Image (spheres, rainbow, N blue to C red):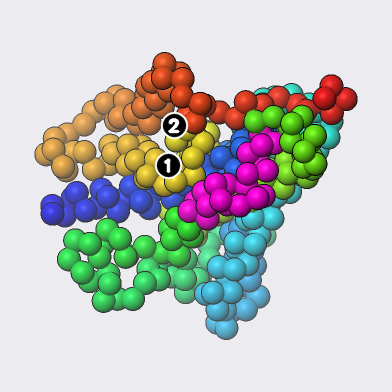
């Protein structure tokens, strides 16, 4: 297989992983009937707080820092940041029944601002760029599977040469799909999203399920932001606009995958390939691309999403439709 094609596939997986976390988290949230458009803000907060946790640990432990501990601290910090952001959203939309679209957009602005504040505060504290040590970078970026698997021709680089976060995102989507389809709590969650009044009458705690799914989903989104900062940005805080693009891509990808976690796996990798295709297309085709053509290529994920939306709406299959109560507040008094 051509080395450029292998590189493209690997780039699709690596660049699609933050999308996989963001999409999985958003699917879990939307399955409860909550439409959280603040994925961008949640990923920003997760990236900033996760990097802060790893950085502070690295500074405190010095040469005695352990990579696995740094990964655990960063994961917990990013997940907690997402949960905290979603608690604000949940209180406003579930308890106070505020408009979910407006609240989600407000969360985007709030989360981005908080993330920028934390990142800049760290930068001012150290008097320069905020970055984790090379040893901790290796803990986040190095492949976790045995070397003999990585050395298998073609298959090794494509399947077995990734870091911990890639396999974590893959596993999270599979577990989520199983829980939603095969367990009591997963089926109850889907019932809440389809008809909260019916679920309430059946004895399901609608408020609890909405809070839990929204908070856990937001925590997963936060891990996506952490992956982007620690792996793609190589552990350096940079206030780029890429997380913003990834946040909205994750929302679009939730629609593209018709709210199915297993579809999110290949969908995220497809979007990762399409979004960064402009970097590989010139070498694959042996051409030079103008800047305006590059911008058009980066539009491909959104174009594909629009096409899928049209096809899904025309076919009108129930299994491809969003939860019936998505984006609507539940008023128990009207039951």
The magenta stretch is 173-193
> How many residues crowd around disc 1 within 10 Å: few (fewer than 14), some, or many (20 or more)?
some
- Residue 196 location (% of width, % of height): 73, 32
Question: Whole-Å distance between the Cαs marked 2 and 1?
Answer: 9 Å
User: Which of the numbered marks, if any, corresponds to residue 263?
Assistant: 1
Name the residue located 43 percent from the left edge and 70 percent from the top edge.
138
Residue at the far top in the pictured view: 314
Verify CB contact (< 8 Å) between mark 2 and mark 1: yes
Residue at the far bottom in the pictured view: 64
Name the residue located 65 percent from the left edge and 50 percent from the top edge.
184
Position of residue 167 relative to residue 38, above or below, is below
Q: Quadrant of residue 90?
A: top right
Residue at the far right in the pictured view: 333
Mark 2 / mark 1, whichever is N-terminal: 2
Q: Position of 152 compared to 241: left or right?
A: left
Asked whether residue 324 appears in the rendered view, the answer is: yes
Position of residue 135 relative to residue 84, above or below, is below
Assign the N terminus to one quadrant of the image: bottom left
Position of residue 192 relative to residue 145, above or below, is above
- Residue 168 location (% of width, % of height): 48, 60
Name the residue located 44 percent from the left edge and 46 percent from the top edge.
262
Would residue 45 be counted in the magenta stretch?
no
Q: Tell me the residue that label 2 is attached to.
A: 256
């Amino acid at each position: 297989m051509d080395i450029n094609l292998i590189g493209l596939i690997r780039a699709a997986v690596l660049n699609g992983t933050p999308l996989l976390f963001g999409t999985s988290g958003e699917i879990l949230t939307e399955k409860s009937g909550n439409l959280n458009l603040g994925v961008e803000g949640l990923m920003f907060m997760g990236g900033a707080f996760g990097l802060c946790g790893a950085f502070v640990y690295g500074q405190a432990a010095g040469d005695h820092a352990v990579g696995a501990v740094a990964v655990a601290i960063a994961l917990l910090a990013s997940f907690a940041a997402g949960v905290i952001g979603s608690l604000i959203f949940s209180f406003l939309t579930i308890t106070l029944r505020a408009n979910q679209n407006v609240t989600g957009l407000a969360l985007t602005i709030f989360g981005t601002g908080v993330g920028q504040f934390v990142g800049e505060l760290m930068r001012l504290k150290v008097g320069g760029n905020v970055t984790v040590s090379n040893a901790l970078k290796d803990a986040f970026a190095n492949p976790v599977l045995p070397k003999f698997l990585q050395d298998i021709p073609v298959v090794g680089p494509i399947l077995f040469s990734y870091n911990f976060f890639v396999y974590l995102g893959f596993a999270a989507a599979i577990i989520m799909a199983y829980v939603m389809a095969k367990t009591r709590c997963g089926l109850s969650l889907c019932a809440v999203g389809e008809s909260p009044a019916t679920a309430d009458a059946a004895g399901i705690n609608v408020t609890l399920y909405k809070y839990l799914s929204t908070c856990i989903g937001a925590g997963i989104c936060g891990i996506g932001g952490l992956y982007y900062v620690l792996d793609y940005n190589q552990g350096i805080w940079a206030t780029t606009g890429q997380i913003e693009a990834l946040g909205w891509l994750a929302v679009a990808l939730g629609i593209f995958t018709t709210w199915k976690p297993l579809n999110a796996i290949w969908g995220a990798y497809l979007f990762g390939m399409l979004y960064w295709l402009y970097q590989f297309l010139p070498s694959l085709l042996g051409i030079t691309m103008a800047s305006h053509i590059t911008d058009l290529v980066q539009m491909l994920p959104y174009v594909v999403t629009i096409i899928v939306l049209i096809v899904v709406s025309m076919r009108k299959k129930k299994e491809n439709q969003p939860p019936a109560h998505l984006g609507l507040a539940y008023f128990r008094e009207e039951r």
